[in-house]
Amino acid sequence: MLPRHLLSSITALLALSAMPALAELKYSNDTGGSVKLYGQLSPAYLSFDDGVASYGDLVDNEVSNTRAGLTVTQDYGSSVLQFDFLTALGFGQSSNYGQAGDPKFLDWRRTFVRKLEVSWKTESAGTFTFGQGSMATDGVAQSDLSGTKMAMYNGLDTVAGNYQFRTSAGALSGIEIDHTFTSFDASRRGRIRYDTPSFNNFTFSAAYGKDILSTNSNDIYADAAVRYKNEIAGTKIAASLGFSRRTRNGSDRDDTFGSISALHPSGANVTLAAGSRKNDGQYGLIKLGYTADLFSVGKTSFAVDYYKGSDFVTNGSSSKSVGAGIVQKFDDARLETYLIVRKYEYTDTTATSYLNASSVLLGTRWKF
């Protein structure tokens, strides 16, 4: 028999998959303006085994969490003025569950605001954005055409980040998943940002900002990125490369990272990502996948990935992970479901050895 809470989670996920699609919540005027409500629900069941004990919870998948937003757009000739507000709804994030305790089921805080920005997009001069939103390198580590990005995200700490490795003696080590697995991908800040128009399939971005939502934070962020999108002989290619700097109390933390993904017309795909933090660790990731039209409801995507990081916790430390998963899309319902299994391994140069850990993530995302 499956655990009662797992049965309840599966029932809820199946109920979501059977929901009919809603009409787009959008109002348009006759002058090129529109108001749109949008969002998504992203429930999942997370199971984690640390080698001694097993845990299971209904969570909000932080890879792409439950959120709601409002966009107001107005055309002015060939330019577009847009206001965007988007916030996560505050459900317990998958990265915040751990052996030491679970987050509140619902606890909205202002740090859940993802966007509160105004942008001005022009054909010839590019796009200017001001307010809370993505830094230039947000998403640079996530160029991914596998169809599994929703669940097998290059950011392993978003799924089970607060869980700790146990020592071979069975004690909690204090070393968490989010200490040993990272992508260096940027986040969202109060910033000014500029994106160029596309030049021969390349787009350049730069941003400067501060963490305006957290209290007592004087950190300054600056970054720049280049992105590339193209299709060559039927093969789609997406790539990105970025550099970001955080300045805290006069000290700089520099990250350089990037990713590239290619999707063949056959459905076969490969994704590579790598990054380095100056004097503080580096990693590499490879993902192999296949997307097929097995069912009329939408594409089915399979993938396996391998992550290897080093020097994150201490010099000489090593973190490895192998993951495998499947994502099924239901196009008419604007929904996708997924099942991901993952193994984690950590070693360092101390006399302490650590038990391997594993996780299972079963979930769905429904967009409206």
Image (spheres, grey):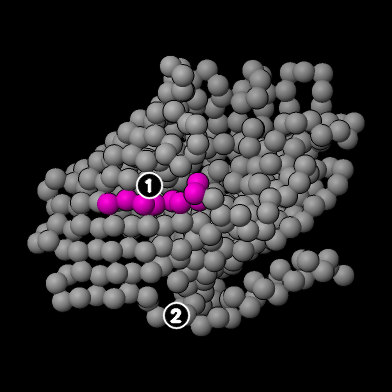
> Quick check: marks 2 and 1 in contact, CB under 8 Å?
no
Magenta span of residues: 110-118
Assign the magenta stretch its main secondary structure.
strand
Q: Which residue is label 1 attached to?
A: 133
Q: Secondary structure at mark 2?
A: loop
Q: Quadrant of residue 266?
A: bottom left
Q: Residue at x 73, y 27 (%)?
A: 347
Mark 2 to mark 1 CA distance (whole Å):
27 Å
Q: Nearer the viewer, mark 2 or mark 1?
A: 1
In the rendered image, residue 312 lying in the magenta stretch gets the answer no
Most foreground residue, 21 or 348? 21
Q: Nearer the viewer, residue 63 or 146?
A: 63
Residue located 57% across and 36% down the image: 182
Q: Within the magenta stretch, is there residue 114?
A: yes
Camera-nearest residue between 256 and 259: 256
Q: What is the number of the mark on residue 311?
A: none
Quadrant for the C terminus in the image: bottom left
Q: Residue furthest front?
A: 216
- The residue identified by callout 2 is 22
Position of 333 with respect to 207 (left or right) is right
Query: What's under tag 2, amino acid-wise?
Result: Leu
Residue that extends furthest to the left in the rendered view of this protein:
77
Residue at image position (74%, 18%) is: 349
Residue 167 location (% of width, % of height): 83, 31
Question: Which three-letter amino acid code belongs to the residue tagged 1?
Answer: Gly
- The answer to whether 225 appears left or right of 98 in the picture is left
